[in-house]
Amino acid sequence: MTNNQTGWFTKEPRKKGTVWIYHYYCTRDSDGRRVEHTKTLGYLADLPTEADARAALKKVDLAKANFSQGIIKFASLVASYKKHEIPELAASTQNCYKHILGDYLTPRWGNLAATKIEPLEIEAWLKSLKDLSNPSKDKIRRVMFLVFKHGQRYGLIPRTEDANPVRWVRQSARSDYEAVSVTPEQAYKIMMEMPPMERMLTLLIAATGLRISEALGLQWADIDYDRKQIHVRRAWVDKSVGEPKTRASKAPVPLSHQLGQYLLEWQRQTLYSREQDWVFPSLKMKGTIPRSASILVADYLRPAALKVGVELAEGQRFGFHNLRHALATFLVSKGTDPKTVQRMLRHANVTTTLELYAHSMTEDRIRAQESVMDAMVN
């Protein structure tokens, strides 16, 4: 709730003596209505004047007082979570969580008492979200869990297991979606359909597995030709500079001699080649900001992929992240040690690398099966 800066004091009798009461209005997050709240400040015997009562008021956190006066609605937990936790997240994660909180969790659960929400109610609701994939539903479940956990951490709800109903909610994270992968040959053909800057960006991502936000966040000072590495120091997300996605994402990216030569040639060509300049600048904005990822995909990458014969169903996604998938698939299919692939993609653990990104090509699976058949019957 949003506190009003003004309020009023009254004196009210109690069994043990007269007390000072502070009255104030708040805007309720769940429905936007103005509602009155009160806070007992102390006995008149201890606070003889209104000035004493005002001094006592300064020591009170009215936002927390709202929670402690009775039933805590889930919307109030969300408001506190957004204030204290969201700013600490990476920019891309902030946007994702705000979307989940604003479009799913608050509309459904905001008006309900947080401690009265039941696990099976949450499960049934998640099952009803027919248009969402299992991973999306699981992400909603995890954000809801974090909201309750935050409420417990701040003492807004009891710190008991049953006070966080999401702890008992079952939701599969398994996805039937398989990302479209391309071969190195296809990636090369896609690149050759693009202008120089877009071509260099596509080559860089295809060869390194950099996320598009990380590639767009690169400045020339991040390219260390001598030590053969690229430093990931920032990400460009939604027109603003933010932190890389995870701690593991900040690990340096290897820079082969050949890729370094291509980058060096691009540095010679670009109008913006100083150390503090963006590697992939917006020409429209005179190099002051990087390019837009969504425009690059819509105007260059996807049309080029379709032109060279990449098969995409109607509405099927294809973006720079598919090149990251393709790199993992190619390396695993060539027998590269999974730990090496993990380090190249800068995943926190190897499970993510193998389960999410390494899509075996049909030909590889056929060859594997043929080798088994040869051993059995020949």
Image (tube, helix red, strand yellow):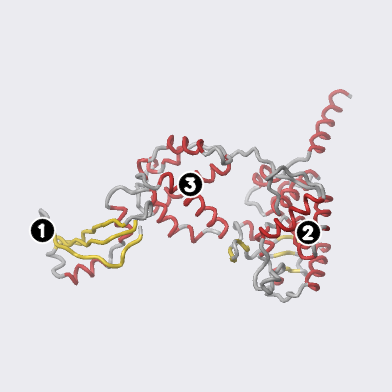
* Amino acid identity at mark 3: Tyr
In the rendering, at what x and y percent does residue 140 appear? 51, 45
Give the residue displayed 82% in from the left and 34% down from the top. Answer: 366
Cα gap from disc 1 to disc 2, whole angstroms? 78 Å
Task: Say left or right for 121 vs 272.
Answer: left
Among the 4 quarters of the image, the one containing residue 62: bottom left
Element carrying mark 3:
helix
- SS of the residue at dot 1? loop
- Picture quadrant of residue 294: bottom right
Q: Nearer the viewer, mark 1 or mark 3?
A: 3
Q: Is residue 156 left or right of residue 310?
A: left
Residue under the image location 78 percent in, 51 percent down: 305
- Residue ranking furthest to the top: 377
Q: Is residue 114 placed above or below 222 in the rendered structure?
A: above
Q: Which residue is mark 3?
A: 104
Mark 1 or mark 2: name the one nearer the start of the chain: 1
Residue 105 coordinates in the image, percent (x, y): 46, 47
Image point (43%, 47%), residue name: 107
Comparing 66 with 223, the one in front is: 66
Amino acid carrying mark 1 in the image: Gly
For mark 1, what is the residue?
17
Please name the residue that numbered disc 2 is placed on: 203
